[in-house]
Image (tube, rainbow, N blue to C red):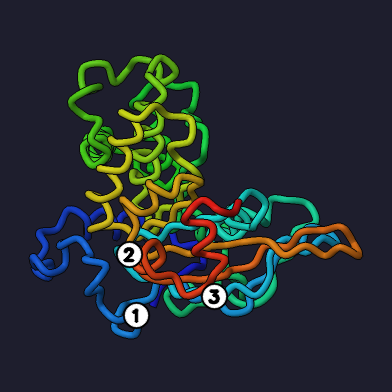
Amino acid sequence: MVNLVNDPSYFSQQTAIRKAPSVETTADDIQPTVHENATPVAAKEDVFVTEGLHVHYGDFLAVRDVDLNIAKNEITAFIGPSGCGKSTVLRCFNRMNDLIEGARVGGSIDYHGIDLYGPGIDAVEVRRRIGMVFQKPNPFPKSIYDNLAFGPRISGVKKKSELDDIVESSLRRAALWDEVKDRLKASAMGMSGGQQQRLCIARAIAVEPDVILMDEPCSALDPIATGLIEELMEEIKVEYTIVIVTHNMQQAARVSDMTAFYSVEVNEASDTRTGILVEYEQTGKIFSTPRDERTERYVTGRFG
């Protein structure tokens, strides 16, 4: 069972696991999902299960009644119009909403069978296991090397040889090593936007998370950089579970295995808008044969 109480040994254990030769991985494990013949949801290993999830900011109900099962080693996309609660739900998965004054999360979120909001759960440990990449690249004003070494250092890694290995491994997984290996001591602020975003993904990888959350990671990038990020997501989902918020429906169709469509309901009496989960299904079905008329209107460009 996953231990979400602060556990200093977690990082070293996970590093050893990543470095150990795999004896369980097979070709079946790493084949991309074929949406038309996807494994039935019941047969998948769930990483997150939400039931009746709702979030208030003060008296304002931002999103309500979200029921989701997010499977291991898949890419799940959240789509929908602005203000429908996509990012709010995403931030629940690593308790980032805890940092917002007045935020209250209700319902339940289980992570590998553990209540993320249960007593004794260390939110810092949760964020170590469940990393996040934001809309705008946010490298630290440090060297490329120190951006990658920062997380492992505060997790207790002191040996330079170990840090060197972590930095190289993380940059290789983020398809960035060949571009920066000769300038690791240079400032990360001098990188292009696309390189900075891949650096932020590498920084998340460096602390050996289980899940990577991405909140519109390509919205500030050009098409070439966006393509590189999408290729990277496909490559690393073999090791990580990925949940992405995107306004780009073509991106969701290209990279995700499952898609959740959110919309808004308007309360005219109070003049407020609350996000709701309309439909959650295999991506191929969402974009070809959605069950709900609201989903069809959105994906065909007739709404939102």
Marks 2 and 3, how far apart in space? 23 Å
Q: Quadrant of residue 210?
A: bottom left
* Total tally of numbered discs in the picture: 3
Work out whether residue 259 or residue 102 is closer to the camera in this orientation and state it.
259
Q: Which residue was labeled with disc 2? A: 284
Q: Is the residue 191 above or below the residue 304 in the image?
A: above
Work out whether residue 280 or residue 16 is closer to the camera in this orientation and state it.
280
x, y percentage for residue 148? 36, 34
**Picture residue at 30% right of the left edge, 36% below the top:** 227
Marks 1 and 2, how far apart in space? 14 Å
Q: Quadrant of residue 241?
A: bottom left
Q: Quadrant of residue 152?
A: top left
**Picture residue at 42% right of the left edge, 41% below the top:** 151
For disc 3, the neighbor class at 10 Å (few under 14, some 14 to 19, many from 20) is many
Please state which of the two labelled residues, at mark 1 or mark 3, is closer to the viewer.
1
Q: Which residue was labeled with disc 1? A: 41
SS class, disc 3: strand
Whether residue 181 sits left or right of residue 115 in the image: it is left
The residue under label 2 is which amino acid type?
Gly
Q: Which residue was labeled with disc 3? A: 50
Whether residue 68 sits left or right of residue 229 in the image: it is right
Marks 1 and 3, how far apart in space? 15 Å
**Picture residue at 69% right of the left edge, 73% below the top:** 106
The residue under label 1 is which amino acid type?
Val
Q: Is the residue 122 above or below the residue 127 in the image?
A: below
| Mark earlier in primary sequence (2, 3) | 3
The residue under label 3 is which amino acid type?
Thr
Work out whether residue 185 or residue 269 is closer to the camera in this orientation and state it.
269
Q: Is the residue 49 above or below the residue 264 in the image?
A: below
x, y percentage for residue 46? 38, 75
x, y percentage for residue 136? 52, 32
